[in-house]
Image (spheres, helix red, strand yellow):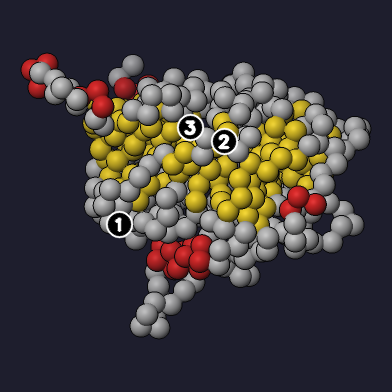
Amino acid sequence: MKFASLLLALALPAAAVAQTPSPAAQKPASWVDAKTGHRVMRLSDAPGNYLLYFNYNAFTPQGDKMVFSTAEGISVVDLKTWAVKALVKQKIVRLLFTGHKTRTAYYTVRATGKAATTGAGSDGQRDPLELWAADIDSGKARKVIDLPAGQIDTMNADETLVAGQVAERAMPLQPGRTERSGKTDQAEYAANGPDGKPLPFAEAKEVRLNDRLEARIPMEIFTIDLKTGARTVAHKATDWLNHLQFSPTDPGLLMFCHEGPWHKVDRIWTIRTDGTQLTKIHTRMMNMEIAGHEWWSPDGKTIWYDLQTPRGQVFWVAGYDVATQKRRWYHVERNQWSVHYNTSSDGKTFAGDGGDSEMVAHAPDGKWIYLLTPQAIPDVAGIHAADADSLIAPGTFAPERLVDLSKHNYQLEPNIHFTPDNKWIVFRSNMEGRNAIYAVEVAKAAQEAGK
């Protein structure tokens, strides 16, 4: 199969019937976490709710609304009133992201009347898709482009290009698993160890990741011009290409990963959309060192990622300055290690979603949502090494617990997001026995803070 023969036609403008938003929901349930003193709100427990992956934009450019998906389509939250309304009432394949310039939610649906192709997305998705856009205020929706094969992952800062990847053939990580928005709703991986006995969830996942990596399926990273429909191949490889993320400020700069067991792959890369300047962001210095779950700082200047030297022993949140190549590493204690981290819009604060005792850190008390405040480690007495500026700048985090997740099952990823005003952190949890979307206030509740 030649990917170059896949022609992407820009769809003719089509007037889709606007979805009338449903009446505002009642004020969300709210309480003060007894162990942390921070206010928590349950925003939605609608069936099939899915909060966007931690490194995808879920907010309007003005920071007043957030989108998420449900079994019925897409909903929108007013971040001032916390009212939830339906935005799109349609069976979707995946809610992708919101625009950086326009108040638009982008999503994919299955193309009607078209057979599955031989090409596939990174997660095994094989159906031809259509990319749609919905105005977040009116609900008016329009088809943007057809996508005969592969998947869309990201949109650039000026909303002129989307980027995605396509594999020559499908290979789901876990045959028969349930798909939801491009990921498992509650991930289930099964594999046996060398002794023939079933492996724990985390180790079974590593086996499945390695199986997919070793298949060496030819893949392409491509971009599509949303004005002309032109499709351009930016990169080809038999590495497993995944997690494409455009810079939030540079329209021509893409970050992507080599997927697979982290101690085996060189994971984090950037490339220009014309295929030039392929750059490896982190080089391993020891065996079993791992780096991943990378994300852009909101200003586009820094790539942040989870770094462990070695895996499961010493933990860092590491930063790489794209312009200067300088590095900053913040040390993380075992109990504060998190499945994902994220950054406030002003770049001054981080958050983590914790992890359970079976995960890579094997933390004995790690099931919390954390606020993490960076603290630099200064030179002693102001005495500087001659090459100090060329060395890694070290630091630590001052952690604060925001939410008790002791009842949360971490097979469901919380996927934390700071709201654009940095006053709340939104996350997903099953801590009440069902999957729901929550927000926790960064400041302590007034009665707890002595106000």
- Give 312 or 411, whichever is nearer the viewer: 312
View extreme (left): residue: 381
Q: Is residue 404 left or right of residue 276?
A: left
Residue 149 in percent (x, y) is at 75, 53
Residue 445 in percent (x, y) is at 38, 26
Is the residue under label 2 in contact with that under label 1 (CB below 8 Å)? Answer: no
- Give 406 or 107, whichever is nearer the viewer: 107
**Which residue is pictured at 43% across the width and 77% down the height?**
192
Q: Which mark is residue 276?
A: 2
Report the residue marked by disc 1.
288
Q: Residues within 10 Å of mark 3 (few under 14, many from 20)?
A: many
- Closer to the observer: label 1 or label 2? 2
Earlier sequence position, callout 3 versus callout 2: 2
**Which residue is pictured at 49% across the width and 22% down the height?**
299
- Give 381 or 65, whichever is nearer the viewer: 381
**Which residue is pictured at 79% across the width and 51% down the height?**
6
Report the residue marked by disc 3.
296
Q: Amino acid at mark 1?
A: Met
In the rendered image, the vertical position of residue 300 relative to residue 196, given as above or below: above
**Which residue is pictured at 44% across the width and 28% down the height?**
322
SS type, badge 2: loop
- Give 26 or 18, whichever is nearer the viewer: 18
Residue 210 in percent (x, y) is at 47, 65
